[in-house]
Image (cartoon, rainbow, N blue to C red):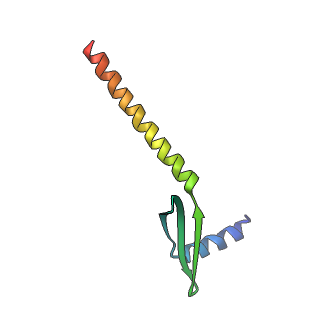
Amino acid sequence: LENSKAKELNSILSMLNLNEEEISFDERYFLIKKTTYQDKQLVSATDITEQKNNEIELLSAKEDAESALIAKGEFLASM
């Protein structure tokens, strides 16, 4: 964006009272964004199911790796 356009966009964004929340519905995840601008309410919903499922898988893998690291440490300590 041009510098003046970027400033204008930042000015508009600073006036928005943006609320975001994640909801799950029927095994799907959505990011809901709500805002009011010049007495008009704007709402958008984005399907983030794939991103959320990847996040859940990554957390599970992290927990598995941490458990394996603890087990390894205990094994080596007992030798």
Residue sitting nearer the eye, 36 or 59 = 59
- Looking at the image, the residue that sits furthest to the left is 78
- Residue 46 location, x and y as percent? 59, 64
User: What count of labels does the image hold?
Assistant: 0
- Residue 31 location, x and y as percent? 53, 64
User: In the image, is residue 23 above or below residue 54?
Assistant: below
Quarter holding residue 33: bottom right
The residue depicted at 41 percent of the width and 34 percent of the height is 64
- Residue 76 location, x and y as percent? 31, 16
Quarter holding residue 59: top left
User: In the image, is residue 59 above or below residue 42?
Assistant: above
- Looking at the image, the residue that sits furthest to the right is 2
For the C terminus, the quadrant is top left
- Residue 10 location, x and y as percent? 61, 70
- Looking at the image, the residue that sits furthest to the bottom is 39
The residue depicted at 66 percent of the width and 73 percent of the height is 8
Left or right placement of residue 26 versus residue 79 in this view: right
Quarter holding residue 47: bottom right
- Looking at the image, the residue that sits furthest to the top is 79
The residue depicted at 74 percent of the width and 65 percent of the height is 2
Residue sitting nearer the eye, 24 or 75 = 24
The residue depicted at 65 percent of the width and 71 percent of the height is 9
For the N terminus, the quadrant is bottom right
User: In the image, is residue 28 above or below residue 57?
Assistant: below
